[in-house]
């Protein structure tokens, strides 16, 4: 019996060998022709017509016999395209394309690239998924994938397999008409920040966006687009090509953002040298000019005119300060302006290091003041917020050039000048105020932000040092000596690292300076209500920084401040100097530009003016709060109130004996009743 089985097996083997050897001729294999029978299907509509069947409000089910045809241009073999097929109406120069959402993988084995297919749409639906127009099945108002059990009934292969010729387009030409087509874009390269990375992450399966940039023949930058790479793709671990060349991909979208999906890494041919960023961008506007565009509220850069700035990175989040912020200035030394950008990104310093030359495309971004500092970012209501992390490379381009920065050396009295906002400065001859000695940069424990105060002896000005509570040095002792501090100047000074504080000299004990800033003239000209003004005078022996100070007004006997007070922040009044705060007609009447112009100065003879410091303490006052000035000794209707020359100390309690008052009213309590004053001859602003 065993012998019989052996013989039987030998016969089987010999038969198989004989069959295979019979197919061999001259050592070449011959593949027999397999006849293909084309299905008898009549196409009823074009792809474009089907796209026009959709109506707003959710998935639109197709109830009639509708059949379309198209050529497969997608391929899921490498895993970058998942459970979808993209088809277009022509193999070359297509006019429309569409995506089929299918609950099945390895679709390439049946629906290969170039295969002409027919899609029976009755019972299916058209609609949107994450802004992408697709064919699927309706699930209420939502669009789901076509079940795998129904695919062969819905999608029928023809015998035709055509060579697909990608549609040649430019990034600047991309629009919704090209969605789901196979396109080719020439003269492209990956952004410099992406170089050295793989298509996706090596250690997880997350989908990763890489920014692709396009250039003209002269290496001038012309646009960018996202290349989306699946964490499940076969080529996820391959390094991105570092050269320049062409890419072939399916154009898709995520809501309003275009995205490219390559079918395999072979869809990229980057054999040419890269374009140099220094030649790619031509700035169209300076940072200083950008700042001058701002007036108030949310400023929109729009898309019609190109806004490109160049700047040098002066901030660093490596040590934890400058969280979600990047600050640029327009020169490596002696800058004329700087600007702050908000970015929703960690470890910004890895892509934009100190001294890097960076180009920023401002189009589609917005600008407003954030905590008093002019800032660029994304809009949210009337505010500016962080640029999304995945959109940063759409707006920021690192030139690859790095320069040594030289901070602007300033005295503490100079740091309030607006021209230094968002620039790198080195403030010399400073130290902690005595009450802050022994303090941490922020706090010795916890993660709360902290502010320390620095001073210079014999100067009334002080500056704040801000430290993020998450900074690596936040819980460390602030140096207690005397010296210089380097940092980015905003509403405070913010350092990059603890080494920015260079306090190597011994601490100095400073004498106490009491600021003597007085209200010295209140004017209500009879001939011009818009020329009303209030004059301040500094009787202190040093300049006084009025940041945080306010001029309040109390109208008609009010007991609380009327309206929005005048904010004196940024104003420095020199020793023996004046500040004029005036209504809008003052300059034309007096031929003098006031320090601050505001309709808030509207006192008509019976209103109180109060000067308060940054702590809210009353420094000086004219009039009695809670008392209407009409009929009182301090009424200045159509007249004026001058501070007597012998008075050189401020007074937080009003004393009429310190003033000489004139009024047009028949008020015998006033020193000079029935004495109207006309501008400009009867007044002396900026003089005492």
Image (cartoon, rainbow, N blue to C red):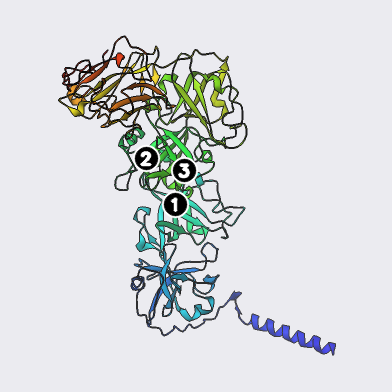
* Residue 382 location, quadrant: top left
- Front-most of 128 and 16? 128
- Give the alpha-carbon distance from disc 1 to disc 3, as whole Å: 30 Å
- Which residue bears the numbered disc 3? 343
Q: Is residue 429 left or right of residue 610?
A: right
Secondary structure beneath dot 3 equals loop
Q: Which of disc 3 and disc 1 is earlier in sequence? A: 1
- Front-most of 611 and 654? 654
Q: Nearer the viewer, mark 2 or mark 3?
A: 2
- Which residue bears the numbered disc 2? 368
CB of mark 2 within 8 Å of CB of mark 3? no
Position of the N terminus, as image quadrant, is bottom right
Where residue 634 sits in the image (x, y, percent)?
Answer: 26, 21
Q: Which of disc 3 and disc 2 is earlier in sequence? A: 3
* Residue 365 location, quadrant: top left
CB of mark 1 within 8 Å of CB of mark 2? no
Where residue 388 sits in the image (x, y, percent)?
Answer: 46, 48
């Amino acid at each position: 019996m065993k012998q019989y089985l052996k013989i039987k097996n030998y016969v089987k083997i010999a038969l198989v060998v004989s069959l295979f050897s019979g197919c061999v001729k001259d050592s070449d294999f011959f593949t027999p022709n397999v006849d293909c029978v084309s299905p008898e299907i009549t196409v009823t509509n074009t792809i474009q017509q089907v796209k026009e069947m959709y109506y707003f409000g959710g998935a639109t089910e197709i109830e009639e016999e509708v059949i379309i045809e198209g050529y497969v241009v997608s391929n899921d073999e490498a895993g970058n395209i998942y459970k979808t097929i993209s088809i277009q109406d022509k193999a070359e120069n297509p006019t429309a394309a569409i995506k089929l959402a299918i609950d099945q993988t390895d679709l390439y084995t049946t629906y290969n690239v170039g295969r002409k297919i027919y899609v029976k749409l009755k019972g299916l639906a058209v609609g949107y998924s994450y802004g992408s127009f697709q064919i699927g099945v309706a699930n209420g108002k939502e669009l789901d994938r076509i079940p795998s059990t129904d695919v062969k009934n819905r999608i029928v292969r023809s015998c035709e397999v055509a060579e697909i010729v990608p549609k040649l387009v430019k990034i600047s030409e991309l629009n919704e008409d090209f969605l789901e087509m196979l396109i080719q874009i020439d003269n492209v390269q990956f952004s410099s920040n992406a170089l050295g990375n793989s298509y996706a992450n090596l250690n997880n399966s997350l989908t990763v966006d890489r920014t692709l940039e396009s250039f003209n023949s002269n290496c001038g930058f012309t646009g960018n687009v996202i290349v989306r790479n699946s964490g499940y793709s076969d080529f996820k671990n391959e390094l991105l090509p570092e050269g320049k060349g062409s890419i072939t991909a399916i154009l898709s979208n995520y809501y309003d953002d275009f995205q490219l999906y390559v079918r395999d890494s072979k869809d990229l041919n980057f054999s040419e040298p890269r374009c140099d960023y220094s030649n790619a961008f031509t700035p169209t506007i300076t940072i200083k000019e950008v700042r001058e565009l701002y007036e108030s509220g949310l400023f929109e850069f729009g898309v019609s005119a190109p806004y490109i700035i160049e700047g040098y990175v002066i901030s660093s989040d490596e040590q934890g300060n400058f969280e979600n912020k990047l600050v640029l200035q327009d020169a490596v030394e002696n800058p004329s302006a700087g600007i702050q950008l908000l970015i929703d990104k960690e470890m910004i310093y890895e892509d934009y290091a100190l001294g890097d030359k960076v180009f920023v495309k401002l189009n589609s971004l917005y600008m407003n003041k954030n905590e008093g500092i002019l800032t660029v970012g994304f809009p949210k209501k009337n505010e500016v917020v962080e640029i999304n992390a995945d959109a940063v490379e759409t707006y920021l381009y690192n030139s690859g050039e790095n320069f040594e920065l030289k901070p602007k050396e300033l005295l503490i009295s100079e740091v309030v000048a607006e021209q230094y906002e968002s620039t790198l400065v080195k403030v010399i001859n400073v130290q902690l105020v005595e009450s802050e000695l022994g303090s941490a940069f922020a706090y010795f424990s916890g993660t709360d932000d902290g502010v320390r105060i620095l001073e210079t002896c014999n100067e009334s000005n002080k500056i704040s040092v801000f430290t993020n509570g998450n900074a690596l040095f936040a819980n460390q002792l602030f140096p207690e000596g005397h010296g210089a501090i380097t940092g980015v100047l905003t509403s405070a000074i913010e350092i990059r690292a603890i080494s920015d504080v260079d306090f190597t000299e011994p601490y100095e004990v400073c004498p106490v300076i009491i600021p003597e800033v007085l209200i010295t003239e209140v004017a209500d000209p009879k001939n011009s209500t818009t020329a009303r003004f209030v004059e301040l005078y500094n009787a202190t022996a040093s300049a006084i920084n009025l940041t945080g100070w306010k001029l309040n007004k109390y109208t008609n006997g009010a007991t609380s401040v009327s309206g929005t007070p005048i904010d004196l922040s940024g104003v420095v009044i020199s020793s023996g100097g004046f500040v004029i705060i005036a209504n809008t007609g003052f300059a034309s009447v007096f031929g003098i530009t006031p320090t601050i112009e505001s309709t808030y100065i509207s006192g008509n003879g019976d209103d109180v003016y109060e000067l308060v410091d940054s702590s809210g303490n009353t420094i000086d006052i004219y009039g009695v709060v809670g008392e209407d000035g009409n009929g009182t000794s301090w009424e200045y209707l159509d007249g004026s109130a001058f501070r007597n020359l012998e008075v050189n100390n401020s007074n937080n309690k009003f004393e009429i004996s310190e003033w000489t008052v004139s009024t047009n009213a028949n008020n015998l309590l006033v020193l000079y009743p029935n004495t109207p004053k006309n501008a400009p001859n009867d007044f002396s602003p900026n003089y005492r």
